[in-house]
Every structure is written in C-alpha cells, then in structure tokens.
Image (tube, rainbow, N blue to C red):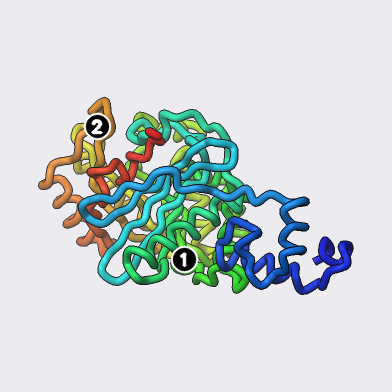
C-alpha cells in the first residue's frame, strides 16, 4: 500500500495486488485485470514475481499426479497430488534435497541445496489446488509435508507458509487438514508445541529400538529415541493432538517380535496411531518389504493393545511418486 501512495495512487490498490498474488495465484501483473494499465506498468518496472513453474507433470495409472517444480533459480523439487474418493491431498516439499540421511529414501541421496522460501511452499499448494480443480473437479482438501526435505529443518518458512495457507487472505484451509511429517528433531518439535499450533504431527519412526533406527536413519545417533519421546510427550501435553507414527516394515531389519513390542511400548505415553506404510524400493534394492504375515502380526499385536493401526498402500509407484521415491530425476 505504501508503494502505491508514494507513487500518487490509491492505497487500496495494494490490497488488490495482494489478493491477486495470494488468493488467485496470478503470476503476471498484466493478468491483474482490475488494476489500471498505468499501475500494472508501474509494478512491472519495480517488481518481479519469482513464481514456481510446473516444469513437468506425470500422471499415474491410479490418478496420482507428480510435478517437477522449477524454482526461480532453476532448481527443481517435486510435489504430488493424491486423489481419493472424497478428497485430494497435496504432498509438498520443503527443501531442495534433504538435510538428513535416511538410507531407504531416494531424496536423502541428494545433498541439501537450500531451503524453500515460504512463498515457494505456498505456490506448490496453489499449483496442486488448480490441478485438483481441473482434473478432479474439487478444491484441495488436505496437505501433507511429506515431500522432499525435512520440514523442521526449514522451520520458519514452513510455519510461515502454513500461516498463509490457513489465513483468510490465503487459501483459508483448516489447520486440522494439514500434517507436518518429521523424521524427529526433538528441539524443533518442542519449539513448535510451544506455539500451540493447530495442525497435525506425523513422525517417520520405522523402529523404536535405537540400534536398529540408527542403522537405517543414522541421524538417530544425534537425536536418540529417548529425546524424541520426551519431545513428543511435551508436544501432546501442550497441544492435546494425537501423534501419528509412520512405520515401514523391512525384511531382516525390523520384522521381529521384539520390534513390535518396542513399538507398542513407544506408543504408550501419548494417544497415537500407527500407519504401516508399504515400502517403495529405490534403485539399489538394499531394503525389501516385510512379509505379509509380519505385517499381519504388527496389526494384531498393536490392536490387541488398543493402538489404532492402518496399513497404507502406496500411490503413484509407476511414476516414482510414492513415499520415499522422490529423487528429483529431472
């Protein structure tokens, strides 16, 4: 608004530009049709809109859409639209590459090149919302921060993006429809809890035994399960929001009865649910999906202790859009 008043224009033009950028997702000043040609030329002279571009789009046989998203500096991240019967979910990235070193995840093999800015995160959501309306005739209903990168290693930008997504000036989406997924950064989980956020938390756990978890997620040596558990207990005490554990069962790694008992014990301290996720192989084939009877044993033992458990089938595997497969092959 100050810009317009200092150039002898009406102050309300600033609000109009804001709405074009954040509510309508317009990327060109010339498309701001309720602003005069003079004012659009003024904006062109002083500003650049560093928007994202969908560089490449792939559609899976199951309807999943994967986007290779080009950023203003030429770097590329990936995002995914996952349709189901009653909703469409955006899986968005928070970093170019990843800060962590999970051995089963394709993204972790890319070095972290930089964090995404809050507007770049927001723009991914806007792009997927447009695709949801175009291909599935409904607005986007859910968002998961489960794309490339560790969201809590880009804490400020992720929270700033969520604030914009949930605001009336943005998409106005309920925070209860947003899930932030982390591999487990205790200090940042506590920091987030202190802000009394309203969105949901998911933890990529995969083992409740330190030795096993450190084998597949080496950063666990820096952030051991004892510290993670303490942070998650703090989260629940502050927010009263149930914790979701994402858990893949691999043959020969976490497929023993002791692994199930450790997970049950880890779930006891706060209300939680467990999503048993189908493993999506990456190129070297080191990790193999646990046998069906082991998955069934996990389900029966968890349910016997009144722990909610769901077996999640992967979507978009034929286009490398499933969990753990985002590797920025573009």
Numbered disc 2: secondary structure: loop
Q: Nearer the viewer, residue 53 or 81?
A: 53
Quadrant of image for the N terminus: bottom right
Return the x and y of residue 123 as percentages of the image width and height: 53, 55
Q: Residue furthest front?
A: 37
Image point (44%, 67%), residue name: 177
Q: Nearer the viewer, residue 21 or 253?
A: 21
Q: Nearer the viewer, residue 96 or 255?
A: 96
Image point (12%, 46%), residue name: 292
Is 3 left, or right, of 224 in this rendering?
right
Is 50 left, or right, of 8 in this rendering?
left
Chain-order first, disc 2 or disc 1? 1
Which is closer to the viewer, label 2 or label 1?
Answer: 2
Q: Is residue 297 above or below residue 253?
A: below
Return the x and y of residue 253 as percentages of the image width and height: 25, 33
Image point (46%, 62%), residue name: 178
Residue labelled with disc 1: 241
Residue labelled with disc 2: 287
Is 80 left, or right, of 289 in this rendering?
right
Using the numbered discs, state the Cα–Cα distance from disc 2 to disc 1 in whole angstroms.
32 Å
Q: Is residue 112 visible?
A: yes
> Callout 1 environment at 10 Å: few (<14), some (14 to 19), or many (20+)?
some
> Callout 2 environment at 10 Å: few (<14), some (14 to 19), or many (20+)?
some
């Amino acid at each position: 608004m100050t810009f317009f008043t200092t150039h002898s224009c009406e102050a309300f033009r600033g609000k109009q530009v804001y709405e074009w950028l954040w509510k309508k997702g317009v990327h060109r000043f010339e498309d701001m049709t309720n602003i005069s040609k003079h004012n659009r030329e003024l904006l062109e002279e002083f500003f650049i809109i560093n928007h994202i571009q969908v560089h490449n789009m792939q559609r899976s046989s199951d309807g999943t859409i994967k986007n290779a998203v080009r950023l203003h500096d030429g770097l590329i991240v990936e995002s995914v639209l996952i349709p189901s019967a009653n909703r469409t979910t955006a899986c968005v990235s928070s970093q170019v590459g990843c800060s962590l070193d999970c051995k089963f995840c394709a993204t972790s093999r890319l070095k972290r090149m930089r964090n995404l800015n809050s507007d770049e995160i927001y723009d991914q959501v806007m792009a997927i919302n447009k695709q949801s309306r175009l291909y599935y005739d409904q607005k986007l209903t859910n968002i998961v921060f489960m794309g490339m990168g560790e969201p809590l290693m880009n804490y400020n930008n992720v929270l700033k993006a969520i604030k914009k997504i949930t605001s009336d000036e943005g998409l106005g989406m309920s925070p209860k429809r947003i899930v932030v997924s982390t591999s487990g950064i205790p200090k940042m989980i506590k920091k987030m809890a202190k802000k009394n956020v309203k969105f949901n938390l998911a933890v990529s756990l995969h083992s409740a035994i330190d030795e096993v978890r450190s084998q597949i997620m080496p950063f666990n040596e820096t952030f051991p399960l004892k510290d993670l558990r303490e942070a998650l207990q703090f989260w629940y005490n502050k927010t009263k929001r149930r914790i979701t554990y994402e858990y893949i069962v691999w043959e020969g790694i976490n497929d023993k009865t002791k692994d199930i008992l450790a997970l049950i014990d880890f779930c006891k301290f706060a209300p939680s649910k467990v999503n048993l996720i189908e493993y999506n192989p990456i190129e070297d084939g080191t990790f193999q999906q646990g046998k069906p009877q082991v998955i069934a044993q996990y389900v029966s033992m968890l349910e016997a202790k009144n722990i909610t458990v769901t077996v999640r089938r992967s979507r978009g595997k034929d286009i490398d859009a499933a969990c753990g497969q985002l590797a920025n092959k573009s």
